[in-house]
Image (spheres, rainbow, N blue to C red):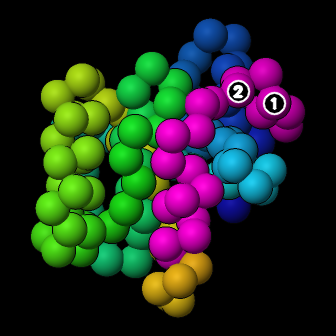
Amino acid sequence: MINRHDNIANMKGAEARVVLWTGRSGRRYTMTREAEDAVAMAPAKIYLLSVGDVIRWAGTAGDLIDDHASRARFRSATARGGEMLSMPAPEDELARMTLVWDLEGMPHYPGRNAA
């Protein structure tokens, strides 16, 4: 279980491991920051690249393999120094696609990360 007092965003200037993000729908998502030097994409997760506090790419490892447009957005975000976040992926394909739509392009509002 996540200890909110140690892990949720913007605590005494330290960067939190867990981040809350709000999607287009208004739904809130809990994401985990991935270590920059140790990312190994797992099939049961959705990965997100944020650049300048905006999610520029969201998807799965399969999206990078199967979807040229997704792969191009991923490369663009990594070239701009994107930060990798992750969260569990829904098993249902439609739910996964909806989640990607809900998050991609959305800015981060750190002030909304109330513990």
Is 99 magenta? The answer is: yes
Picture coordinates of residue 39, whole percent (x, y): 24, 51
> In the rendered image of this protein, does residue 44 appear above or below residue 1?
below
- Residue 2 visible in image: no
Eyeballing the image, is 13 above or below 59? above
The magenta span reads 96-115
Residue contact between numbered discs 2 and 1, judged by CB atoms under 8 Å: yes
Q: Amino acid at mark 2?
A: Tyr
Q: Residues within 10 Å of mark 2 (few under 14, many from 20)?
A: few
Q: Is residue 67 left or right of residue 104?
A: left
Indicate the secondary structure of the residue bearing disc 1. Answer: helix
Q: Is residue 68 left or right of residue 31?
A: left
Q: In the image, 93: left or right of 65?
A: right
From the image, tell me which residue sits under label 1. 112
Residue 16 x, y percent position in the rendering: 58, 30
Q: For residue 41: magenta? A: no
Quadrant where the N terminus sits is bottom right
Q: How many marks?
A: 2
Circle 2 — which element? loop
User: How far from the left and from the top, in percent, is residue 23?
Assistant: 68, 49
Q: Is residue 32 positioned above or below 93 on the image?
A: above
Quarter containing the C terminus: top right
Tell me where residue 15 appears, x and y as whole percent: 54, 23
Of all residues, the one furthest to the right in this rendering is 114
Say whether residue 83 is visible: yes
State which quadrant residue 108 falls in. Answer: top right
Dot 1, how many residues are within 10 Å of its Cα: few (below 14), some (14-19), or many (20+)? Answer: few
Give the residue at mark 2: 109
Q: What's under tag 1, amino acid-wise?
A: Arg
Name the residue: 52% across, 25% down: 53
Residue 51 vs residue 17, the one in the foreground:
51
Cα distance in 3D space between marks 2 and 1? 6 Å
